[in-house]
Amino acid sequence: MFVGMSAALGLMVGSFLNVVIHRLPRMMEREWRAHCAELAGEEPGSAPRYNLVVPRSACPHCGHAISALENIPVISYLLLRGKCKGCGAPISARYPAVEALSALLSGFAAWHFGFGLAACAALLFVWALLALTFIDFDTQLLPDDITLPLLWAGLLFNLPGTFTELHGAVIGAVAGYLALWAVYWLFKLATGKEGMGYGDFKLLAAIGAWLGWQMLPLVILLSSLVGAVAGITLIVAARHGRNIPIPFGPYLAGGGLIALFWGQALTQSYLQLIAVQ
């Protein structure tokens, strides 16, 4: 029952995550423009309210307001056959994909950890990483509005040692930030270019705060391997230019999720392999 309820909750949260993924970068852009206008001594414009709640979701093509029956996760997409009820314009398949992925990962987290604090914490961790993954894919941004609360939440959940001891979480946050910070500056000094953004530092710091410093080598290794394979594939198959940046946040998030569920088992297997050799 707990697994089913968690999957159903993940489905509904996935619908909200679609709103976050779409609107949060635009909210950030509006805030940046307002700050720039203020610094330039200009009068701020009277733009309509725009946040995660207002205005109501609508079709970007015809402005048709999405009703409650049209906003049922996954089911509404299937009933509408992937088209807007108002104008028939296609609806991106990513919306139900995010909802289904959120439900799948939420149910798996509930099954993996069982009823308790660890499962509830894991759900928040999964949802935050999902939002960050798709925002980074779209905009190459990892908003502080998600990464910083995620970092503090990791430290709070580890006060009772939910995933690791508190001192390990604190060291993990510091080491996660400094590890990519050092890579950033070494790459910049060697090439004169920026190899990654500051959001990547904060995301790895947040993962370190949740899982502890012991998991950071595994997270970095997994994310680097997946990122390298994906980057080479894009360059070769999709003719993706080498000078076009590839977001690293999604691969860090993937490494963090793998470490959350199987990090201990992978680390123990590796240590046993070394001991045998």
Image (spheres, rainbow, N blue to C red):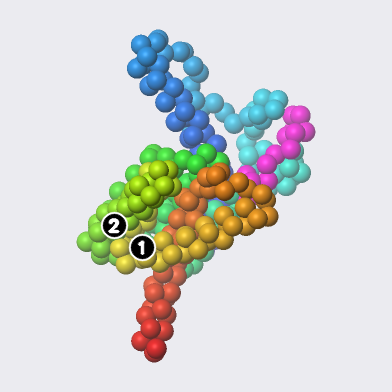
Residue 169, quarter of the rendered image: bottom left
Determine whether label 2 and label 1 are within 8 Å by CB.
yes
Which residues fall within the magenta stretch? 84-97
Q: Is residue 146 magenta?
A: no
Residue that mark 1 sits on? 216
- Residue pictured at 45% horizontal, 70% vertical: 262
The label number, if any, that marks residue 129 in the structure image:
none
Q: Is residue 90 magenta?
A: yes
The label number, if any, that marks residue 175 in the structure image:
2
Residue 38, quarter of the rendered image: top left
Q: Earlier in the sequence, mark 2 or mark 1?
A: 2
Q: Nearer the viewer, residue 95 or 227?
A: 227
Residue type at numbered disc 1: Leu
Mark 1 neighbour density, 10 Å: few (under 14) some (14–19) many (20 or more): many
Does the magenta stretch mainly form a helix, a strand or a loop?
Answer: loop
Number of callouts in the render? 2
- Residue pictured at 57% horizontal, 61% vertical: 229
Q: Is residue 41 above or below residue 78?
A: above
Q: Is residue 44 left or right of residue 19?
A: left
User: Whole-percent x and y of residue 116?
Assistant: 38, 63
Q: Nearer the viewer, residue 216 or 134?
A: 216
